[in-house]
Image: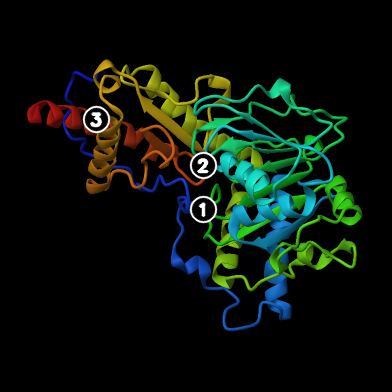
Amino acid sequence: MSASATPARPAIAPADPNFSSGPCAKRPGWSLAALEGAFVGRSHRAKGGKAKLAEVIARSRRVLGLPDDWRLGIVPASDTGAVEMAMWGLLGARGVDLLAWESFGEGWVTDAVKQLELADARTLKADYGRLPDLGQVDWRRDVVFTWNGTTSGVRVPNGDWIAADREGLAICDATSAAFAMELPYDKLDVVTWSWQKVLGGEAAHGMLALSPRAVERLESYTPPWPLPKIFRLTKGGKLNEGIFKGETINTPSMLAVEDAIDGLTWAEEIGGLPRLVARSEANLAAIAKWVEATDWIDFLAEDPATRSCTSICLKVVDDWFVALDDARQAAVAKRIVALLDEADAAYDIGAYRDAPPGLRIWGGATVETANIEALLPWLEWAYATVRAETAAAA
């Protein structure tokens, strides 16, 4: 539809208007009843508590197809905690290449350069909507990167650019990719994610997966900086195996644990990882079809091969919007988001605060494609409404 047309207010809103990029939509049919089996009022170190934590690890391994020789543990502080545990414990043994094309990748650059003050750190950056030149990565070095840029909607297209005979470690923040995208574990050494993304769990806890190569590094290298207690993955020079059996470093929320089990159980019941990936890709396809037919909107990701199927980021491209200054563009985008929120048509779909003004629609596996399709007429309505409001105020 052309931006010059003013559509009527749609009659039907999405059945679930939760399109936030984190915490994300709960799985279809979820209710508080899903938490009735939570191991509350008891120690998480009791037999029942350990069993619940171990169940999260075991189900996660099964759904993701994690190799048998990898360790998987529950760690504090969501994906951020998991990534920083890996960086603080593993980096410094050799030079490191840091890839950044959006806000969270920039955060890992800051950690390495300004906090750890690594002497041999090289940064490969790209603007929002693009990837750095992956061919410039030096696999004699450690490499830190996001698989899917949550704030830019740009993902790496595959693992072909990662050297099979790499000397360094591939440290991958996969928080908005795990459970929605296939990850090549033979090309990775550290993979992290959080519960509140693709399976719609509650926040505060992260997952840390380590390859045998990463474990070998932990047991053979001692970083020169002090490690806070919650970052320590080794004890007496050996991997602290308890972390990877459900013996968490800090006290977890057993309500959040129960919710994670519920999401993983649902994932297995619907067909596991292939079905989760298919659901996310179907959501991307629905939006792509609409974008193709709509002249005022486009993907922030410039290359179709790099478009995220979870954090789907869009930009306004018609001449009226492009001619506005930065402040007015931001105001228009904010007003669109506010209209959709007020109409209970879509919640929390504004672009990330550091990203260009636009929309960010979560399309992870818990989101029904029917709700994505129901949202699209509302986007048309909201944009046309804001254009009309702006013209009337001029």
Is disc 3 placed on a helix, strand or loop? helix
In depth, the one of 22 and 124 nearer the eye is 124
Q: Amino acid at mark 2?
A: Gly
| Residue underneath mark 1 | 200
Q: Residues within 10 Å of mark 2 (few under 14, many from 20)?
A: many
Alpha carbon separation for disc pair 3 and 2: 24 Å
- Marks 1 and 3, how far apart in space? 28 Å
Three-letter code for the amino acid on which mark 1 is drawn: Gly
User: Do callouts 2 and 1 mark residues in contact (Cβ within 8 Å)?
Assistant: yes
- Decide: is 316 above or below 231: above
Residue at the (69%, 61%) spot, across then down: 74
Say few, some or many: other residues with alpha carbon within 10 Å of mark 3 (under 14 / 14 to 19 / 20 or more). many
- Residue 296 in percent (x, y) is at 31, 20
Residue ID for mark 3: 383
Instruction: Provide the residue designation for mark 2.
Output: 364
Residue 372, quarter of picture: top left
Relative to 152, say whether 233 is above or below: below
Circle 1 sits in a helix, a strand or a loop, which is it? loop
